Image (cartoon, rainbow, N blue to C red):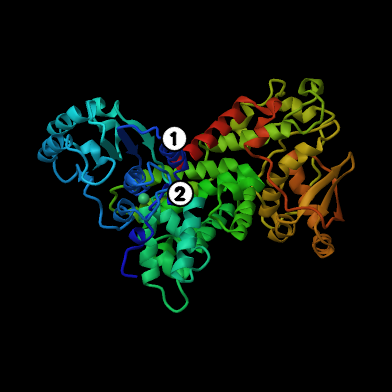
Amino acid sequence: MSLALYRKYRPSTFGEVIGQEHVTTPLSNALASGAIHHAYLFSGPRGCGKTSSARIMARSLNCEQGPTPNPCGVCQSCKDLVANGPGSIDVMELDAATHGLVDDARDLRDKAFFAPVQSRYKIYIIDEAHQLGPGAANALLKVVEEPPPHVIFIFATTEPDKLISTIRSRTHHYPFRLVPPGVLGEHLEKICALEGIKVAKGVIPLVVRASGGSVRDALSVLGQLLAGAGADGVTYDIAVQLLGFTDGALLDEAIDALAARDGATMFAAIDSVIESGLDPRRFTQDFLERLRDLIIVGATKDKASQLLRELPEDQLERMATQANIIGAATLIRAADITAEGLTQMRGATAPRLILELICGRILLPAGDDSAVIARIERLERGVNLVAHTPINDLTPSPSVISAPVAAPAAVQAPKAAPKKEEVKTAPVVHVAEPVAAPVAPPAPVAPAVVHNGPVDIAALRRLWPDVIENVKKRRRLTWSLLAASAQVLAVDDKAITIAIVNAGARDSFLRSGSDEILKAAFTDITGLNLKIEVIVDGSINAPTSERTVEEHDDADALSGTALLARELGAQVIREFEQ
Ligand SMILES: [Zn+2]
């Protein structure tokens, strides 16, 4: 592989340029219809095809059969201007970054009026055009303002706003973009196949991430990986190490620890990061991106694979379960804390310390606003538990009981909430039966709602993730039987019916007395004190959390807090995508 990949696979026609159809299509149409302008401006991030496209434009304009979007490839001009070809005497490239170009610009101004030597047009490609000094820009302006008919300018720049406006206003502006991951990934796969080198699953997404959407950077990284490939081709381990990314397994470990609020495992993961020589900043960045992905997975459910195309299916499934267990509010809070920590890390002398503090804050069952919102979200879901019965109809019987621990949420409780004394004496309150001492007693959480009407099954399903979370604190065995393979099927005034995916799981569930654990969890979260019944239903899917952005699209449920939480989520996602 003597030639760098990005040179070897440089496009020679607009049809070969990837990911810039919004620019190459109108340019091709203009070439086909003969609508030729005398000055073009190609702007956009580095490495996404501006200069290559400028050369293609020159080739298309000067082809003997042209101007044409499909240069013939056989005429002298086409041969001269093919990618990596010798170049043409009538196509001049000037790089404004190297010097002010004053002399070049004056020279250009003088020579522009002479006809092209052997082609249709004399074409000037001015790279990094925003760096033209005032002297050079003024010299050029003269020609750009009143160009001879045989002269065409193509300005390329990463910063179109810095190009002097008198020139910019005379150009047709075509903004290039970073290449979307899916498109870039396919392109890289194709090149690996052409190079005949095997690349392990998961490597291409890493290269795409490392490139940030720049084709040139992607091919440069890929070239390095291919050059170092052994008999097995490029392995995932080699790619992770060479590119300095965090191993996906380590991220999974950290996220699972967050789900379980397991500090020991979380800090062990940090230790592995440091031990493996990974930069704590890199890990924090990757952790933040994983949190962002989890927020997207949680909010979009089965559509996540379309948005996160670079992630393999098994990874998405694992993340769906994680997002479900952790919950949107907690993910957003964790992402906020991590993003803030990442900012503090810039220039910090002890990034590991900051990373540990980030994890400490994330694990802390915090009393800050997001934690309150998370709790209010739960309360709101609980308030809707009684189907078709306005809260006011329940008065004077208490509709909501705020426990001492839920103090911040109590402020937000419906106005009809009675004083504590009334709660104690109210006759219709369903008092939870004493439950068997749990293996690991959870923090006392008050019932969000005490009901006395028909129960809304949908509301009950919305609370299911919280119930599962509560079960987890009580007994892990019960949690593991339910977390991935059970769903609320029905509820009446005597019992809640749970569907479990297979008979084996149901038997273990009953044998272990897990029904009592689940009953107690339901009482904690919903205030319902109902018997648990279990049936087997192989057709159910793993439970999906309904506490998502979509849920709040239901106009009735769109309270101020829900709006705030939704806006917060959208904002976090927007910030990460920039
Ligand atoms: Zn030609």
Q: What element carries label 1?
A: helix
Left or right position of 469 against 266? right
Q: Which of marks 2 and 1 is nearer the N terminus?
A: 2
Q: Mark 2 — residue?
A: 15
Image quadrant assignment for residue 545? top right
Asked if residue 353 shows in the view, the reply is yes
Q: In which quarter of the image is the C terminus?
A: top left
Distance between the alpha carbons at the discs numbered 2 and 1: 17 Å
- Residue 336 location (% of width, % of height): 47, 41
Label 2–label 1 contact, CB within 8 A:
no
- Relative side of 176 to 398, left or right: left
**Residue 308 located left or right of residue 103:** right
Of tags 2 and 1, which is closer to the observer?
Answer: 1
Q: Residue 511 versus residue 187: which sits nearer the camera?
A: 187
Q: Report the residue marked by disc 1.
A: 33
Amino acid at the residue labelled 2: Gly
Measuring from the top left, give residue 421's x and y in whole percent: 73, 26
Towards the viewer: 263 or 454: 454
Q: In this view, does 57 lie above or below 2?
A: above
- The residue positioned farthest toward the bottom in the image shown: 231
